[in-house]
Amino acid sequence: MINILFAAPPERWDFYADALHEALDAAAITACLSQDLPPEDVDYIIYAPNGPLRDFTLYTRCKAVLSLWAGVEKIVGNDTLTMPLARMVDDGLSRGMVEWVTGHVLRHHLDIDRDIHRRPGDWTPRIPPLAADRPVTILGLGTLGLECGKALAGLGFPVTGWSRTTKEVPGLTCLHGKDGLGEALKTAQIVILLLPDTPATENTLNAETLSMLPQGAVILNPGRGPLIDDDALLAALDNGHIGHATLDTFRIEPLPEDDPYWHHPKVTVTPHIASETRPGTAARVIAENIRRSEAGEPLLYLVDREAGY
């Protein structure tokens, strides 16, 4: 019998329990899955950073911590977590991100907001450019960035991907490093931020890098709030250099009611919905990692503690 502790917010238990039991059964794993187990008896921890667990020192038998979140910035620096840590990468999460990104890229590309607010009698014609004439840059070429890049390239957009290290992706122009960042930004009419939240990525978009973008460029941030210098972005929106920002993640969530993003005419706020973990697909990833661990195979999506993701 394998003992698995569900260490996410208690109200999430009903959301995940059936899917986890079903996935464990399908993987032929005989397990006791519970929200309450003696720490010394726990073999695996299913974890969410917004749950109650902070101190892992009592879990001396635990073989791995399996996160329900793609982002691990809130836990990767916890010195008490000494066992392997795996982040969540699942098809449902990837597809959700692709759909959010593709939807908002097309919204801005086709200037749908303008039509939504068109007044009666306004029959002013316009011809949007084709996708081939709308360069898009994705900052971050992890799993989510790659999937979004492939989807947009499939629609005909010229896609440039930037990462901190060298990558090669068929159909995408791939750049890396500090010099590559400037190159990736200078032609980008739409920029999508999908970098992890680490000290090295904080304020990737700041006054200097925003100025590298073409006049009227649009920014989409479904990645992490700290990737953007908020004051610099607001200034660039106010002076017209940036045409619009659609933001799904913020430094403080929920976004405070008095935050200027709520009230800015060139900002669209969405409430961190770009890619939610879905129980059915996430449970299968959890079960597969437990199966792999028990079979002596390497874990999927193991976190590099030094890199921070």
Image (cartoon, rainbow, N blue to C red):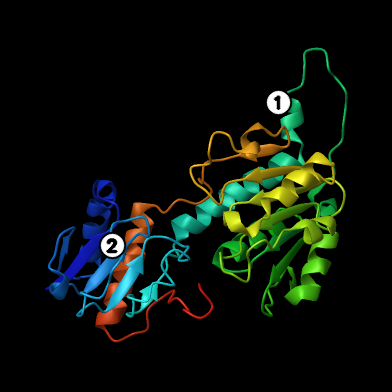
- The reply to whether callout 1 and callout 2 are in contact (CB within 8 Å) is no
Determine crowd level at label 1: few under 14, some 14-19, many 20+ residues with C-alpha closer than 10 A: few
Q: Write the residue at 35% across / 79% down.
A: 84
Picture disc at residue 223: none
How many numbered markers are drawn? 2
Picture disc at residue 116: 1
Q: Write the residue at 70% across / 34% down.
A: 264
The amino acid pointed to by label 2 is Leu
Indicate which disc, 1 or 2, sits on the residue closer to the N terminus: 2
Q: Write the residue at 56% across / 64% down.
A: 197
Q: Which picture quadrant has residue 149?
A: bottom right
The percent coordinates of residue 131 (x first, y second) are 79, 50
Viewer-nearest of labels 1 and 2?
Answer: 2
The percent coordinates of residue 183 (x first, y second) are 83, 68
Tell me how far mark 1 sits from mark 2, CA to CA. Answer: 46 Å
Comparing 37 with 89, the one in front is 37
Quick check: 278 left or right of 229? left
Q: Check the image and report above or below for 163 versus 104.
A: below
Quick check: 261 left or right of 305? right
Which residue ends up furthest to the top in the rendered image?
121
Q: Quarter of the image containing the N terminus?
A: bottom left
Determine crowd level at label 2: few under 14, some 14-19, many 20+ residues with C-alpha closer than 10 A: some
Q: Check the image and report above or below for 241 versus 52.
A: above
The percent coordinates of residue 276 (x first, y second) are 45, 50
The amino acid pointed to by label 1 is Ile
* Residue that badge 2 annotates: 53
The percent coordinates of residue 89 (x first, y second) are 45, 65
Q: Which picture quadrant has residue 152?
A: bottom right
> What kind of element bears circle 2?
loop
> What kind of element bears circle 1?
helix
